[in-house]
Each structure stands twice: as C-alpha cells, then as structure tokens.
Image (cartoon, rainbow, N blue to C red):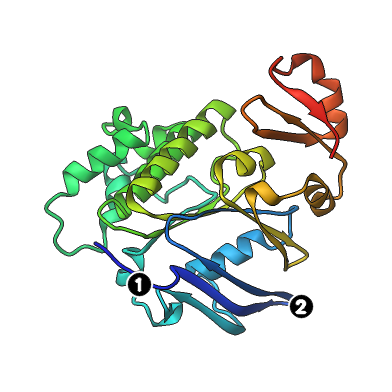
Amino acid sequence: MSYRAAHLLELQAVTLKLGGHVFGPFSMTVQPGERIAVLGPSGAGKSTLLKLLAREYLPSSGQVRLRERCLTTWSLVDLSRQRAILPQSHEVAFGLPVELVIGLGRVARMVDPDLNVIVRQAAELACARHLLPRRFDTLSGGEKARVHLARVFAQLWDIEQGLLLVDEPMAALDPGLQWQLMAAMDQFARQRGHAIFAILHDINQALQGFDRLVLIKDGRLIGDYPRRQIALSTLAALYEVNLVSAVTEQGQMLVAPEAALVTSVDFMNDNCYHSMY
C-alpha cells in the first residue's frame, strides 16, 4: 500500500497530565524512512512520549497527527495497518503457538490469503523461523524477542511508509542478539520506507543506527539533533555524567562513562583512538 503525506507523524504542542506530573509540550515531525532514537535518563518521560504516539494516552492539550489526521480519528483497525509497536515486555497471556503469535500481527485483516507465507517470511527475517513449531511459553527471553519482532514485521509487511514504535525491548538481551535484531529491523524498514521511533538506553546503538537523536529530560523535549551534529557535552549534560569517546577509523564514535572507558582501555580495538570532547 502506498501513502503520501506532508509528514508521516506530527506532534503539535502536545502535553499530558498524569497525576501531579505534566509532560511536554512536545512538538516535532517524523518523515517516512527516518530513524529516530529517543534518549534520556530513567524516568525522563520517554515511554510516556511513546504511549502518546501509540494512542495509549490521549493528550491533555495539543494534537498528535498521523498522515495529517488527528490520531484520535483513526479506527483501531486502520491504525493497526499504519503503525506497529514493539514493547518492552516479551510476554503473552497464554502458551500460544509461535506461529499464532506472529500471525496476530495480521489480525486486522478480514481476508488475508497470504497470511501463512508472510508469517514464515517475517519469522525468517527475524531469525525465528526455527521457532515456528514451538510454544511461546517455552522460549527463552531472546527467542521471545525474535518472535515479537517477527509479529511486528508481519503487521507492516505489505505496507509502505508505516511507523515502527520501539520501546527498549532488547535491553536484557546479549549484545550480539541486540545488534542482529536491530539490523533486521533496519533492513525491514528501509525496504518499505518505514520510519522507526525507538526508545533507547544504549547511546552507542543510537549513534550508530539512527538518523536523529531526540533528547528527553524531566518530562520535556530538550533537544532534537541530526546524529552527526550531536556534541558529547550535550549527551553528558543529559545524563549528568562525564563521558569520553573513541572514534574508529571508519568515523564511528563510541561513548562510555569516563571511569568505565579508562578502566577498559586495554581491551578496546586497536583501530580506535581516544579523545575528550
């Protein structure tokens, strides 16, 4: 399905009141194909922002617009065919077959003759095809992450310029699997022009895999930078910690808290050199 709009997603002075806390205002746009990482300390409001975009929360003021339409005017069926959510939790309520869990991404389609083919192809891309005969409650945490990623792929498999909302679902996985699944997500999105809007705790993952860095602190949007224009001092101020960097010969910047980098310097790749920003 092809779809053209001035902006894929737009936040217009969005605020949210939860108890005694006020989040926002948030104003930004997301274009098709963009890769946006949201960074900030724990409790900053990153997941709250994502829930506004997912329509789990309704704004107290302002508007969230998807394809130039207010998000609240979309039916759930139509909305599920334009955006998919990869959550923090990997659990499902019952011990469902893996094939069925992936197929749930297609549930909004009344007629879906390609369901079985898409489920298998989505599982293949998420490195989960070998898990199809299994039951979900028998899987490890990493295997569950692969299955949920395949479910998201299945949901937006035949859509162009959709939106992937990702809420730090890979933080508990080993680094190799994190990078493998992020690479699969990037490939999937690039082939279809999907935008990725991801909550991350890993600064290096954001620096190496995303186009824009959105910075959230104390419930406020404090910065929105192209990746190559972000200063290390800005990231240090965001987390209130001293940071140092290492830059590879390929020009990729790696970041770590100062003490951590100093104590591990002997273990770093010889192709890196160290510099203070």
Q: Quadrant of residue 67?
A: bottom left
Residue at position x 64%, y 73% in the image: 26
Query: Quadrant of the image for the N terminus?
Result: bottom left
Spatial CA distance of label 1 from label 2 is 30 Å
Q: Position of residue 92 (x, y in %)?
A: 42, 49
Eyeballing the image, is 80 above or below 227? below
> Is the residue 185 above or below the residue 3 in the image?
above
Which numbered marker is on residue 96? none
Question: For mark 1, what is the residue?
Answer: 76
* Within-10-Å neighbours for mark 2: few <14, some 14–19, many 20+: few
Residue 70, relative to residue 161: is it above or below? below
Q: How many callouts does the rendering have?
A: 2
* Residue 22 versus residue 110 in the image, above or below: below
Mark 1, mark 2: which one is toward the viewer? Answer: 1
Which amino acid is tagged 2?
Answer: Gly
Disc 1, SS: helix
Q: Residue lying at the far bottom in this picture: please name it.
A: 61
According to the image, label 2 marks what residue? 20
Of callouts 1 and 2, the N-terminal one: 2
Q: Position of residue 170 (x, y in %)?
A: 55, 40
Q: The residue under label 1 is which amino acid type? A: Leu
Q: Residue at x 53, y 34 (%)?
A: 178
User: Residue visible at 84% across and 40% down?
Assistant: 277
Q: Position of residue 2 (x, y in %)?
A: 26, 63
Residue 230 on image: x %, y %: 72, 50
Q: Element type at marker 2?
A: loop
